[in-house]
Image (spheres, rainbow, N blue to C red):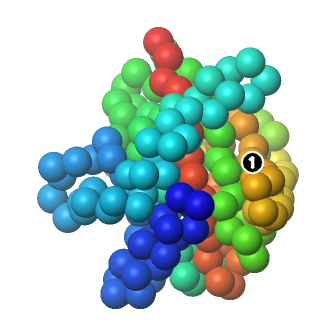
Amino acid sequence: MQVDAAECELQRHARADDQRCWGYFPSLTGQPGIRTNLPACADFAAALPEVTAAGVTYQFNFLRLSLRCQSPEPAYHLDSDAATALTGDPATLYRRLVGRILLNLSTTEERTLHYLDLDISAAALTRQGCYVRAADQAEAARYAMRETIPPRSGRITHGITFVANQVLHSGVDGPRGHFVAAYGYDRS
């Protein structure tokens, strides 16, 4: 299966990385420090270029694998685009819809999506690079909710859909990291 080959390819690179994390982000081709010559990941993306859920079609955006916990505490943010989550223009964030479906491809680890049950128009927000974050993470945490995405089992893959530029959210790893695929749309 393409997913297993992609996982092995990402694991090889993650083992050599200081952060023990590696991803395949085809929209960043040509950017400094980005390696997109990952044939198994490209095969995965070609085999499953889009996913449809509840009548909405999401395009392949990226794969990411980590061999250790990258984020034990949530850092709530809005995605500025679908392709990478952080390369969009924050100035146009509120004029677009950035939809996301996050699939947990790990066969052993759950993936937890933490989010805030909070209307972003009532929240104090701040820009940090291309991310828009809750200005006071501790205050925002009062509205914290979470959804656990079970591990993949054979051909059954679990995921979650949400509007990533209207829901303050954060992925949180277990001790052995994560393996996820992200699909999305970016509409004006």
Considering only vertical position in the picture, is 136 above or below 106?
above
Q: Residue 104 placed where, x, y %?
A: 69, 58
Q: Residue 159 placed where, x, y %?
A: 74, 48
Residue 128 vs residue 25, the one in the foreground: 25
SS type, badge 1: strand
Identify the residue at image location x=50%, y=17%: 187
Q: Residue 123 placed where, x, y %?
A: 66, 36
Which residue is disc 1 drawn over? 159
Identify the residue at image location x=81%, y=64%: 153
Q: Residues within 10 Å of mark 1 (few under 14, many from 20)?
A: many
Image-quadrant location for residue 37: bottom left
Q: Is residue 154 left or right of residue 101?
A: right
Q: Residue 151 placed where, x, y %?
A: 78, 65
Residue 82 visible = yes
Name which residue type carries label 1: Gly
Instruction: State how many labels appear.
Output: 1
Residue 69 vs residue 51, the one in the foreground: 51
Identify the residue at image location x=20%, y=64%: 33
Image-quadrant location for residue 166: top right
Query: Quadrant of the image for the N terminus?
Result: bottom right
- The single residue placed furthest to the front in the displayed view is 1
Considering only vertical position in the picture, is 36 above or below 97?
below
Residue 138 visible = no
Identify the residue at image location x=77%, y=37%: 118
